Amino acid sequence: MIEKILTLSVVFIGLCSATIALYGFKKKQPDKDFTGIWFRVKTWWGMFVIFCFATLFNPIVSLFSIMILCFYSLKEYFSMMKTRKSDRRLFLWSYLMIPLQFLWIYVGWYGMFIVFIPIYVFLFLPVPRIIGKGTLGFLRSVSFTQWGMMLMVFGLSHLAFYSSASPEYGPNLVLYLIVLTQVNDVVHSIISLYFGRHKVVPTSNPNISWEGFIGAFLTTTIVSYVLYPYFTPFGIQYGVLSGVLISVTGYFGSLTVSVLKRDLLIGDKEKFETLQGKYLSRIDSLTYTAPVFFHVTRYFFDFM
């Protein structure tokens, strides 16, 4: 327990430092747009509160908190879609799948957890859309719903399975994952803001640059080298490689969700600007880093 409290204390000090530093930057450079970075720091605080409960209290609290996170992320995702009345049945069934996914985590049934959404839900979801609703818009609504389930539920639900797979190391691994993911996101945003010249997808997200990717990659790798002895049971080799893995997958997660949002919101600039400040924009990287880090770690280490 003392080790967990010390770990959370270090994260708390880091968050306070980041918040104060960002506030100072905003005061000194009012012409710069720090909105995206500010929202990410706020997300850090939200995640910190959730995982304080996850680490210090009953694991069921953690399970329920992450389930709520998945629900609201999926709800925001659905709010971007141009829907018909026939799509509402799909959405209802998607929401009902969330508690089932977390039931498998609660009972520790890894086999069902890992195939439930990619196989059973994927095969089942078209059925409610087909019955009595015809073919108009079928592929678009079903495929978009399946993508939402994969990213917002399947991907994020891995955050809850860490503790189930490894009660001893799981909570600290989640904190380690979140810290590195958010460091990667914030450093990428800051470098792209000041030095971003070569855009990766300028038509989809002008804030993602190659300079930001390289700077975030190097920073996240260095931070992983500093933090891994305190948060993880890894040796130096995987301790550093985990930073590389989280940086690269976080970058692809942010890029994918950015393009997905712009595809869904083409021609709806007002809604796009409104959703920029929502929670989905802040956890995009975690939809990739959480499952990839989990499965790579589970493959190489017996404690998962």
Image: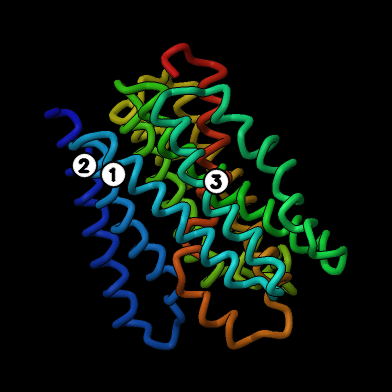
* Residue 256 seen in the figure: yes
Outermost residue on the right side: it is 135
Tag shown at residue 70: none
Label 1, on which residue?
51
Report, in whole angstroms, how far the alpha carbon at label 1 lies from the one at label 3.
24 Å
Label 3, on which residue?
97
* Residue 215 seen in the figure: no
Mark 3, other Cα within 10 Å: few <14 / some 14–19 / many ≥20: some
Q: Residue at x 41, y 37 (%)?
A: 160
Q: Nearer the viewer, mark 2 or mark 3?
A: 3
Mark 1, other Cα within 10 Å: few <14 / some 14–19 / many ≥20: many
Outermost residue on the front side: it is 132
Residue type beneath disc 1: Phe
Label 2, on which residue?
8
Left or right? Give the position of 133 relative to 171. right
Query: Mark 2 near mark 1, Cβ–Cβ under 8 Å?
Result: yes
In-front residue for pair 138/26: 138
